[in-house]
Structure formats: C-alpha cells, structure tokens
Image: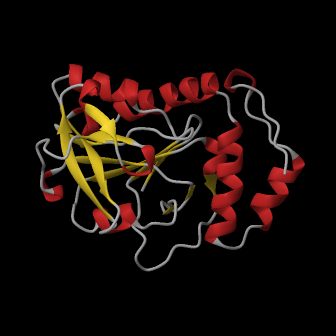
Amino acid sequence: MKYFYFGKDANIIYSLDFINSIKGANTKDSLRKTALSLRNSLNKKDVISMSEDIFNSFLSIENIQDSSKFMLYVDFRNEVATREIILKLLNLGKEVYLPVTLKEEKKLIPKRIFSLDDLVSGAYGILEPHLDAPTINPSLLDVVVVPGSVFDRSGYRTGYGGGYYDRFLENTDAIRVGVCFDFQLVDDVFPENHDKRMDFIITEKNFLNF
C-alpha cells in the first residue's frame, strides 16, 4: 500500500489507497495498521514541524499552564515528537515524569527526570528513565500526555495493542491529553468498556476538548 503526502505547509495529502483504507477499516487493528503505515512514511522534518504546532496548542491550555506534575513519553517511530516540550517544561520548573515499561507485568511506572541525559534504552528500545529514578504515585500527576495509533472525535484512542496506557489511566485523575497527527484522527475507533476517554486531543490542525 503506497501513501503520498506533501509537507505540513502544503497540507498533507493522502493517496486514494489511504482514504479508502481508513473508510473501510472496521476494526481497531485495521485502523491501527493503516494509520501507522502512513506515520512511518513521514519524513522527520515534517514530524518535528507538526509536533511543534501540537505542543504550542498544548501550552496554550490554561489548566496545563497551572499544572506542575507532567507525565509524557519519549517519541519512538515517528510518534509526535516530545523532546522539545520535555525541555520546555523542565525549563519552566515543572516536574517531568516519563514511563518505565515493565513488559512482564504490562505496566508503566512514572519516573522523574531532570534532563534528557537521564534516559537509557529500555523496553522495545524506547528511551526511558533509570529504574532507580524517583517514582510518583499516578494519582498525584496533574497531566498525562498520551500517545496512540488512532484517536476519534469522541475522545477515545487506540494504542499499540499492549493496553499499557489503559491500565495506567485507571489509577489517575490527571488531565488526559491525546496527541497525534491529523490523519490519525478518525470518526470512530470502536472503543471498548476498558478504553479511557481523553480530556483533550490535539493535532497540528485540530484541538478537541471533551
């Protein structure tokens, strides 16, 4: 399946194959595979540029500005890029936590970082804090920035199949902010009872508040 796109300034234009695949997708798995195929084809310059727009919108939210304890993620495989926003939050004096992934337990543990130099290669080759870094109880977090493969206009998401974030979000009342590129925003991701709704979904073109 081939996808074609132009850079952000010209707007991303999808091939007919992609449009038909999204419209014809009727399961979480088919939506996930289609969206991730396109995301993997993006060039890094566009990923960085669109991510900057997303996090400029993120920082404009009053509740975000007033928050102090943030959990984010380190981007991997063309996810919305987070390293610049991590640095900005650290420079603003915010507490920044990133997940350590426990594969056997299928669990995320939020660990505090003070610099991007604190990161090491962890599960799945994703950068994460040291295991001995300070931990916070998820219930004390103010904001959780949530990645995903696909989000819908009702506030739900589809992740990568492991259920890590669904389980994690059960233990916190933090503001849930889903971030993705605009082509990952669809009408319906077929949510199930265990799926957690976002409070905000932000793309480079859309800002949804639920």
Q: Quadrant of residue 7?
A: top right
Q: Is residue 148 above or below residue 42?
A: below
Q: Nearer the viewer, residue 108 or 87?
A: 108
Residue in the image at 48% along x and 60% along y: 155
**Percent position (x, y) of residue 46?**
63, 26
Q: How many marks?
A: 0
Residue in the image at 62% along x and 43% along y: 182
Q: Residue furthest bottom?
A: 193
* Residue 204 appears in view: yes
Q: Quadrant of residue 129?
A: top left
**Percent position (x, y) of residue 199?**
37, 54
**Percent position (x, y) of residue 83?**
39, 28
Residue in the image at 18% along x and 50% along y: 141
Report the quarter where the C terminus lies: bottom left
Q: Is residue 198 left or right of residue 78?
A: left
Residue in the image at 12% along x and 56% along y: 137
Q: Quadrant of residue 168?
A: bottom left
What's the image's color scheme?
A: secondary structure
Q: Is residue 74 left or right of residue 100?
A: right
Q: Is residue 47 left or right of residue 170?
A: right
* Residue 60 appears in view: no
Q: Nearer the viewer, residue 142 or 158?
A: 158
**Percent position (x, y) of residue 111?**
19, 45
Q: Is residue 1 left or right of residue 194?
A: right
